Image: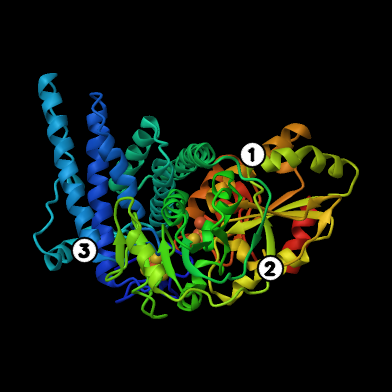
Amino acid sequence: MFCVQCEQTIRTPQGNGCSYSQGMCGKLASTSDLQDLLIYMLQGVSAYAVKAREFGIVNADVDTFVPKAFFATLTNVNFDDDRLVGYAREAQAYREQLKTAYVTACEANGQTPVVIANQGQINLAASKPEMLEQAPVALPNRGDVHEDIMGLRLLCLYGLKGAAAYMEHARVLDQTDVDVAGRFHEIMAFLGEDSIDADKLFTTAMGIGQLNYRVMEMLDTGETSAFGHPEPTVVNTKSIKGKAILVSGHDMKDLELILQQTEGKGINVFTHGEMLPALAYPAFKKYSHLVGNYGSAWQNQQQEFATFPGAVVMTSNCIIDPNVGDYSDRIFTRSIVGWPGVTHVEGDDFSAVIDKALELEGFKYDEIPHSITIGFARNALMAAAPTVVENVKNGSIKHFFLIGGCDGDKAERSYFTDLAKSVPDDSLILTLGCGKYKFNKLEFGDINGVPRLLDVGQCNDAYSAIQLALALKDIFECDINDLPLSLVLSWFEQKAIVVLLTLLSLGVKNIRTGPSAPGFLTDNLAKILEDQFGLRTTTDVESDLKAMMTAA
Ligand code: SF4
Ligand code: SF3
């Protein structure tokens, strides 16, 4: 196996990456190899999708399948070998379908079809052990190339993986775009070619950022048209007596189905992790049994799910081993999520989850409530913009910090709590992603009625934060990089990588990321990104804060 896609990857003086029998995330070498083989197959599908498009042949099922199956290979999503084998076989079937359509179209038009080698031809073996023997060809670090080229390839691969995840989140909400799918296939196919052209790879990385900006816009449209615009909302974060279901991950469509199917059944529904922002959407407010948020970010699930006395649903990333907390019989996976032996809910019927919740004891008593305020996505931010601008003009607000991204369990991540606590009192903090749990239960007060901590939403709601920055830039008639705004991104997985690429592709400079640099970025690449974009890794709160305030 070789995997270096997330922040917790194994780092040694000999090189970075999980490459032994198991990754830090618990992913076994066999699972990792099957994921690589799946990606290899998907690159073959995309290569023929690009060719077929030359004749106007667009297969909507393929456009759905490729990003969705790619999403299954993201960190902490799918650890179930059987499902991965199934996706790989499906990929081969789609590839052959497209190949036939393409060859037929070439013949009809008197053209000689191009033969796509490698990913376009490989036939999967009949059994899993034999497939694992095929896997080395698909390793992400395949080939003997300069480490900077490899770093750029991996930046693109992992960035595109993040974009694929957001494409799938958007598709679930009926947001698809034939041009976005076409561009996605082009990049996927290009990455299958194992390019050694540094300029082209760098341009592709920026292209992935631009593609993802459009994808995040689609997702924003999908979420706001299905559920309305988030509004500032006070949320209880403590338990409430009664039977209970906990819904985690990013997919609010699943939350809606669960709420509809639990109505009148005497079950309280709680959000967890990245599902917290759902509580701010008007569409969910009509459900009185959606009672609040329980727990925090993904890395604490083995304690939090273990003590949650009900059923748990993982709608998307991040899942970790449910056997550790001994709750594998009451956790359910959805969509692309998978864990061997855990019940996977297909279709729209959540009765297995409901039955499990009814069977379990539930919370025995109410805890003393503790409230937090959420719901500052695009519309709410825009509504607050005039007051914010007035306070900037009269000197009450001097600086904006965006401190957001992913959470994780490394001790160094206390940096983000310390930073949020240390920013000057005359500054606002925007936050998003599950990284917010590092400080979202602290009290930050307000500036003339504007809350100092503004929770924008999930990681994809970086789109809302970008819209606010663009609006402020117009109001103050300046470049986005001249705003008194500092961005500090906590990263863990590939969605964060693509959000970073999106910001860079929009020309946003001087972003800090932490707690460590991606394991696939070489010193040379880090230097190029620093020279070109001012991108740097977090150091210590005092020095970083001083530098950010001096730059403002
Ligand atoms: Fe290692 Fe992260 Fe890959 Fe898991 S996802 S194998 S921890 S790099
Ligand atoms: Fe969190 Fe996995 Fe990234 Fe959506 S849920 S931010 S880590």
Horizontal relation, residue 259 to residue 30: left or right: right
Q: Amino acid at mark 1?
A: Gln
Residue at mark 1: 467
Residue 86 visible? The answer is yes
Horizontal relation, residue 79 to residue 535: left or right: left
- Which of discs 3 and 2 lies nearer the camera? The answer is 2
* Res 138 quadrant in image: bottom left
Q: Nearer the viewer, residue 468 or 140?
A: 468
- Which of discs 1 and 3 lies nearer the camera? The answer is 3
> Please, is residue 462 above or below residue 339 in the view?
above
Q: Secondary structure at mark 1?
A: helix
Question: Residue sitting at 10 percent across and 59 percent down?
Answer: 125
The CA span between labels 1 and 2 is: 31 Å
Q: Picture coordinates of residue 147 (x, y %)? A: 40, 59
Q: Secondary structure at mark 3?
A: helix
Residue at mark 3: 82
Question: Residue sitting at 35 percent across and 62 percent down?
Answer: 333
Q: Quadrant of the N terminus?
A: bottom left
Q: Is mark 2 within 8 Å of ligand 2?
A: no
Q: Amino acid at mark 2?
A: His
Of the four image quadrants, the one with ligand 1 is: bottom left
Q: Are marks 3 and 2 in contact (CB under 8 Å)?
A: no
> Please, is residue 466 above or below residue 137 in the view?
above
Q: Are marks 1 and 3 in contact (CB under 8 Å)?
A: no
Q: Picture coordinates of residue 210 (x, y %)? A: 49, 38
Question: Residue sitting at 75 percent across and 35 percent down?
Answer: 478
Residue at mark 2: 370
Task: Tell me which numbered mark, 1 or 3, is placed earlier along the sequence.
Answer: 3
Callout 3 crowding tier (Cα within 10 Å): few <14, some 14–19, many ≥20: some
